[in-house]
Image: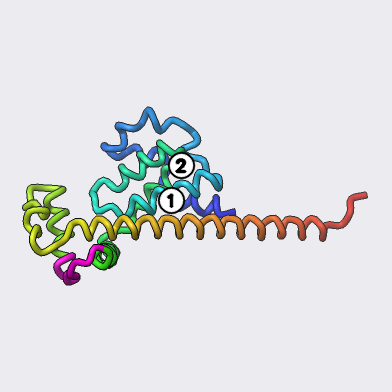
Amino acid sequence: MPQKRLKELLPTPEKILESRTLKLFAPHLADPRLWHFNRHSLNKAVYIGVLSAFFPLPGQMLLALIGSLIFRANVPLAIGLTWITNPLTSLPIFYAGYYIGAKIIDVPMISLRLIGRMIADFSLWALSDGANPFITYRGTVSIAAFCIGLTILAIITSIICGLVFKAVWRYRTVISWQKRQQESSNKPPES
């Protein structure tokens, strides 16, 4: 079953609660349904985690945690999936989001270098005392295109990942069941 492999990869409740921010949610995290490794809990976590990953906030993991609490999804998987957007993948993902939004609302496309500079400035602004990128890039960048494109990309990617997870889970379960059936049919009858 895929459960064993997922349990090895995902953080434990203790590891998650080491975070100072997440300690605030400790009383709510006592619900054992949030830590179950069953098809329904994990599938909801895939939708929530992937959707949360596309928000350009430093609080993606917090957003995934809140979604997991509301929908009773697996917390470790939802939080782990927020790392889809990381320092290596954020630039192409945000570029694709801006591209989609720019095509929808018909605004000119900006360069990849400018998006990279925006991400760096946004991180500095959110995590320290950098300049506000919403003011700095007001005339050159369409925040509406960025938000619309990322939202559409997040929803589509979340749905695709959730459906793929469900199909893989079902396939692995059927294969495992068939294997057990074959093994039991090959056993000699007991006398």
The residue nearer to you, when weighing 25 against 97, is 97
Residue picked out by circle 1:
47
Look at the numbered disc 2 and give the secondary structure of its residue: loop
Please rate how many residues cluster around mark 2, counting C-alpha atoms within 10 Å: few if below 14, some from 14 to 19, many from 20.
Answer: many
> What count of labels does the image hold?
2
Report the span colored magenta.
105-115
Q: Position of residue 14 (x, y in %)?
A: 39, 38
Judge whether residue 108 is colored magenta.
Answer: yes
Q: Say whether residue 61 is left or right of residue 71.
A: left
Task: Please indicate whether residue 178 sits to the left or right of residue 72 in the image.
Answer: right
Whole-percent x and y of residue 139? 8, 61
Colour convention: rainbow
Residue shown at the point (26%, 45%) measured from the top left: 59
Identify residue for label 2: 73
Quadrant of the image for the N terminus?
Answer: bottom right
Q: In the image, which is nearer the foreground, mark 1 or mark 2? A: 1
Upstream in sequence: badge 1 or badge 2? 1
Disc 1 from disc 2: Cα separation: 9 Å
Residue 25 rendering spot, x and y as whole percentages: 33, 32
Which residue ends up furthest to the top in the rendered image?
27
At a point 7% along the width and 53% down the height, the residue shown is 135
Q: Secondary structure at mark 1?
A: helix
The quarter of the picture where residue 166 lies is bottom right
Q: Residue at x 35, y 56 (%)?
A: 154
Identify which amino acid the numbered label 2 is placed on. Ala
The question of residue 40 being in magenta is answered with no
Please tell me whether residue 152 is drawn above or below residue 76 in the rendered image: below
Dot 1 amino acid type? Tyr
Q: Are marks 1 and 2 in contact (CB under 8 Å)?
A: yes
- Work out whether residue 129 or residue 13 is closer to the camera in this orientation and state it: 129
